[in-house]
Image (spheres, helix red, strand yellow):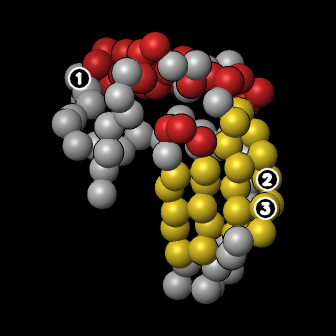
Amino acid sequence: MEKSIADWRNRDIANQDVILNCNGAERRRGSAAEAIDHPLVPLTWLANELSRTGIGLKAGQTISTGTLTGMLRPKAGETYVADFGPLGTVSATYA
């Protein structure tokens, strides 16, 4: 279920820590400031580039601006949870 982040424009998104857990055990930590300066930088580039080429972004599309915790290779049966503190969590279970 999608959930909007209230008042996101006034939050320090770039410095928000994220903790990545796998099956309840912490695997990685990071923040957008360490990885890409701010997550709106690549998003702005993508929106401008797709607009320039006539493709554009469409309502309902999901955009990923990269990883804040580095790459891991999930195994079947593992559940990963990324905890963004007051911004919420996202999880994925791999079959």
30 relative to 66 in the view: left or right: right
Q: Secondary structure at mark 2?
A: strand
Tell me the amino acid under the disc marked 2.
Answer: Arg
Q: Quadrant of residue 78?
A: bottom right
Q: Are marks 3 and 2 in contact (CB under 8 Å)?
A: yes
In the image, 18 versus 6, the foreground residue is 6
- Which percent across, then down, holds residue 85? 59, 42
Type of amino acid under label 3: Glu
| Mark linked to residue 54 | 1
**Left or right: 1, with 65 as reference point:** left
From this view, report whether residue 78 is shown above or below residue 17.
below
Cα separation between marks 3 and 1: 42 Å
Whether residue 68 is visible, yes or no, is: yes
Between 1 and 50, the one nearer to me in the picture = 1
Residue 41 x/y as whole percent = 54, 18
Q: Position of residue 88 (x, y in %)?
A: 49, 46
For the point 77% across and 27% down, the residue is 34
Label 2 vs 1, first from the N-terminus: 2
Which label was assigned to residue 28?
Answer: 2
The residue carrying mark 3 is 26
Marks 3 and 2, Cα distance to the nearest angstrom? Answer: 6 Å
Q: Secondary structure at mark 1?
A: loop
